[in-house]
Image (cartoon, coloured by chain):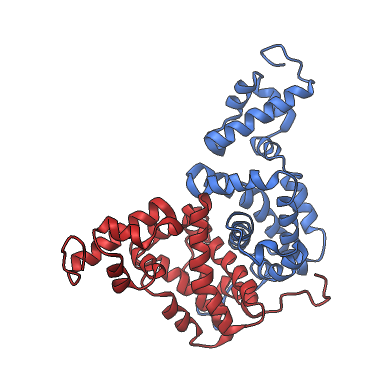
Chain colours: A blue, B red
Amino acid sequence: MGRTGRRPGNPDTRAEILQAAAARFAAHGYERATVRAIAADAGVDPALVHRFFGSKQDVFVAALRLPFTPATVVARLLDGSPKDVGTRVVSTFLSVWDQPGAGDRLRAVLRSATTEEHGARMLREFLLDALLVPLTEGVAPDRARYRASLAAAQMVGLAMLRFVLVVDPLASAEPSALAAAYGPSVQHVLTGALELPGGSR
Amino acid sequence: MGRTGRRPGNPDTRAEILQAAAARFAAHGYERATVRAIAADAGVDPALVHRFFGSKQDVFVAALRLPFTPATVVARLLDGSPKDVGTRVVSTFLSVWDQPGAGDRLRAVLRSATTEEHGARMLREFLLDALLVPLTEGVAPDRARYRASLAAAQMVGLAMLRFVLVVDPLASAEPSALAAAYGPSVQHVLTGALELPGGSR
């Protein structure tokens, strides 16, 4: 129960924790925004934050108001032919950005990752550790982390060109057409051969 | 001749113009850093800046101290089999970043592109208009600008993961191994089919 005597079941409490979390993550970055500090800002006990949301990563996802948890999106991406996983990754990624309000919040994550080390760490932990490494382990276990980092490069670049730099024709392409054009590139790094046939590496 | 009476042939004058240009581009971005203002900062006539460097784009390249001009790098990339152009693009890109001091200057360009509209415009004009569009027109004239914007996404993402976010194993991979792994993805968007076989776009 909150130290202010607020009832834990109150929907306002949940919203206030998320508001405090969003403000802390924006001001201090992922690493330094502790669950303890978020709880103090919201006037509740840290245990209540964990009971509502789970881990700090879950608080982060909830504060970004992303319409998924990493585990469910990985499961959904793995549910289908491994041959088309690259295209599914691109279309899922684009649909997340197109959720109302998500673009502004994700753009802020990218900007923070480009300018501050804790923002960079937040993106690494979220995009790699929570999403792309578990996904890659499900489709191509050999060198999964290398493949995941190559795919992360392609997704971060796609977001940069489409949503930050706004470069046409990429920026105005239909999501399904863009997924069809870009998906095979992602597919290559996820499941293709990583060395040249001649072995020149 | 400069308004301060400095001799145009003096090597110091050239260096002072470049220093003024680098400071202006960093402080005001590409668009607002006029040749007139750069010349004024260096205490010379704008005509002298044009005589030394050519266009504003050439001043920018010189101020970044990149070891090439866009036209020569495009010509070099087109000199070889169109089947391997993707791998050549990646290895050339990595070798530019590895020039002494280039990493810091290029990271500053990326940061400015992520946080300011004039930085974004500078990157669009340089990476797309000066480099990737002319390159793509040389290998796959159909939808060259769309292909170039897809390749730009992959190169910006590669730079972000390797040099800004520093995500391993990508960040510590040997340049030749990385070019072999990532090149085919770039190749696909430069010369491959952009729609799914079923025509679902």
Residue A122 appears at what percent x and percent y?
A: 57, 44
Q: Considering only vertical position in the picture, is A83 above or below B75?
A: above
Q: Give left or right: position of B192 versus B24.
A: right
**A13 vs B123: above or below:** above
Q: Residue A123: image x %, image y %?
A: 58, 48
Q: Position of residue B187 (x, y in %)?
A: 61, 77
**Residue A181 is at least partly visible in this image:** yes
Res. A50 image quadrant: top right
Is A197 placed above or below A137 here? below
Q: Nearer the viewer, residue B87 or A192?
A: B87
Q: In the shown orientation, is residue A201 left or right of residue A168?
A: left
Seen in the picture, residue A98 relative to A9 is either above or below; the reply is below
Q: Residue at x 48, y 67 (%)?
A: B126
Residue at the spot x=50%, y=68% of the render? B127
Image quadrant holding the N terminus of chain A, namely top right
Q: Position of residue A58 (x, y in %)?
A: 69, 38
At horizontal 57% and vertical 57% (from top left) the residue drawn is A165
Q: Residue at x 51, y 53 (%)?
A: B165
Residue B37 falls in image quadrant: bottom left
